[in-house]
Image (cartoon, helix red, strand yellow):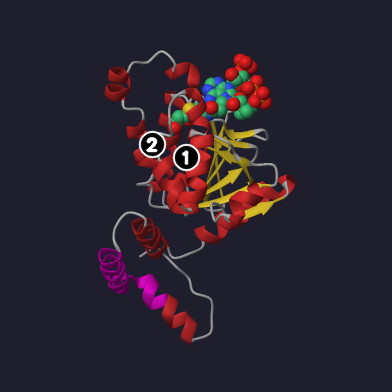
Amino acid sequence: DPEFLRVSTEKGVGRIELRRPKVLNALNRRMVAELVEMLESFDREDTVGAILLTGGPKAFAAGADIDEMAGATAAEMLTMDPFADWDRIRRVSKPIVAAVNGYALGGGCELAMACDLIFASETARFGQPEIDLGVMPGAGGTQRLTRAVGKARAMEMVLTGKPITAKEAYAAGLINRVVPAEVLEEEAMKMARELASKPPVALRLAKRAVQRAAEIGLEAGLDYEQKLFYFLFSTEDQKEGMQAFMEKRRPEFRGK
Ligand code: CAA
């Protein structure tokens, strides 16, 4: 059983709660390894269509575990390569909805950004404070944040280390929704359930195609998108989805 996660499955949604409350869910290597294992396990599980990732009431996660890194040398960091595990998160093919309460700082912000949709409570704070530790973001913060909010704001956040509010994050296009803390879990779960009801093959490929937009140029991206689109015509869900539309009934998707 995982030491730092609480895990459950309900109505097609795999739910993962980060649980290391004494240190505001600081992400040590064990916790990240557990998280990646669990994400991959949900990715393989047929009854799960989408994943919900959440933290605690005060912190989604306050960053990588500083105590664990403080004494490391560059050679040790390079050979341990803690971020190799993080890279596996982006290969999870089912959509991940992050529900963020409180602090999402450093690695916590980077973890939220590695998810596909972000729901936040009004009290959530997003930031990359690594500069004040004498380092810089290392798990995607300079790249994903810049792609999400643009150079001006990313530069300010990364160089000053100052967090932004949920409202500011929403206005900047970093997150999908800001809701009162009391309904955060419910709203995020509703979204995850909706995603879990979608045709699974099309959902995975659509996620991958949107991810690719941030990775490759327009021409290659359009070409990739077209091929995936054509490929989906080999699935039963495409036949069912279009047939159901024409017959004015609800489709029944089977992931085939
Ligand atoms: N690593 C280790 N421990 C942490 C931690 C972290 N990232 N964040 C918080 N904690 C611990 C604190 O040390 C404290 O422990 P003790 O009770 O044993 O003293 C406990 O969590 C509670 O924290 P605070 O007392 O500091 O709580 P606060 O409400 O006063 O402040 C906070 C909250 C502003 C989030 C503050 O804890 C903070 O600044 N944390 C560090 C944020 C940070 O710098 N994150 C980036 C980490 S580096 C990184 O993430 C690299 C990367 O790119 C992957």
Residue in the image at 64% along x and 47% along y: 166
Q: Quadrant of the C terminus?
A: bottom left
> Residue flagged by tag 2: what amino acid is it?
Trp
Q: Is residue 151 visible?
A: yes
> Which residues are the magenta region?
218-240
Which quadrant holds residue 194? bottom right
Q: Nearer the viewer, residue 17 or 87?
A: 87
* Residue at numbered disc 1: 110
Rendering coords of residue 183 (x, y %): 71, 49
**Magenta-span inclusion, residue 224:** yes
Residue, far top: 71
> Residue flagged by tag 1: what amino acid is it?
Glu
* Residue at numbered disc 2: 86
Q: Nearer the viewer, residue 255 or 198?
A: 198
Relative to 166, is 239 above or below? below
For the residues labelled 1 and 2, say whether their Cβ atoms are less than 8 Å apart: yes
Rendering coords of residue 213 (x, y %): 36, 60
Q: Quadrant of ligand 1?
A: top right
Q: Residues within 10 Å of mark 2 (few under 14, many from 20)?
A: many
Tell whether 233 sits left or right of 28. left
Residue in the image at 47% along x and 53% along y: 150
Rendering coords of residue 83 (x, y %): 36, 32
At mark 1, the secondary structure is helix
